[in-house]
Image (cartoon, rainbow, N blue to C red):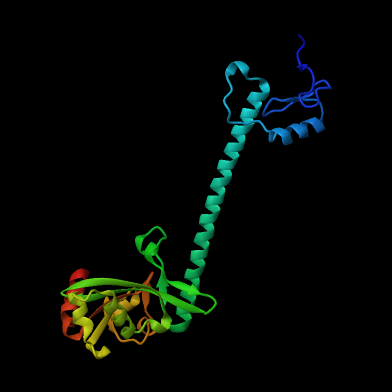
Amino acid sequence: MESCEDPKKCSMCHQNLIKYTCPRCSLRTCSLSCCLQHKKTLNCNGQRDKTSFKSLTTMTDLDLLSDYRFLEEVDRQVETSKRDELANKMKSLNESTRFQKLIQTRLKSLASIHVLYLPRFSTRHKQNQMWFDRKSNEIFWHIECRFFSDVFYPWTIKRLPTKDTTLTNLLEKFRDHCNENDSIRSKFKNISSEEEICVYIENFGQKRKQFGKYEKRSFHTMIDLFRERIFIEYPVLFISLLTDENHMKEHLLGKQN
């Protein structure tokens, strides 16, 4: 009994002798038209599955070459990914540095305020969220306040525009942040005037020799508070009631010693 298909003839037209073998499904065809027809009929892309298992006994030199090229392609993709990751990090770093320069230039021109930045791997630098909006030409502040009541209670507010960095506004936001039962909140709750509050900042450089490490300052906004002064990364304010001023100074000087 004769076979219904001749193995030497095309698997699609069954008329012409075979010339090509599909790398993916191993179907044998005679021409381009039959090759395209087999791809359409069998939904085959004609590309060898580079990750499919093949036993050593059936491997040919072409299979070995294909595997070698596959490994080269993988290595190339890994190297490209590493370069892209490095480029993105450098872009992010450059963007951050550019905004730091804008903040430094803006504050120096407004009130001779000098901003010092720590290395980017330092904790304080990573915490810093001061921002410069180029559209509005506005600085958005990151401010750490340390309210004193026997001990210091740290509180941080972020992305605050310059016009909102008044002492009154800071006190309101701090009271809103605290729980009703917090002793520190009750202590600062019934303040009727800013004159009942004292604010100290830490001096750096020549100002430390001139005014001491901690200096009492009055202000309307952060620009006034740090006029002709220096801060590192972002402002830190030491705040107490006027009645607790001497006690707070003792803590600050004790911290200094």
Q: Quadrant of residue 230?
A: bottom left
Percent x, y of residue 186: 19, 80
Residue 191, by quadrant, is bottom left
Residue 184: % across, % down: 20, 76
Could you tell me residue 63's position as x and y percent?
65, 24
Left or right: 65, with 219 as reference point: right
Residue 224 visible in the snapshot: yes
x then y, percent, for residue 27: 71, 25
For residue 103, side relative to residue 194 (left or right):
right
Q: Is residue 208 above or below residue 4?
A: below
Q: Residue at x 54, y 55 (%)?
A: 88
Q: Residue furthest top?
A: 1
Q: Is residue 57 above or below residue 192?
A: above
The quadrant of the image that shows the N terminus is top right
Residue that sits furthest to the front in the current view: 1
In this image, 197 relative to 128: left or right? left
Identify the residue at image location x=61%, y=34%. 72
46 or 87: nearer the viewer? 46
Name which quarter of the figure residue 163 lies in. bottom left
What residue lies at 77% left-to-right and 33% top-to-bottom?
Answer: 37
Q: What quarter of the picture does the C terminus occupy? A: bottom left
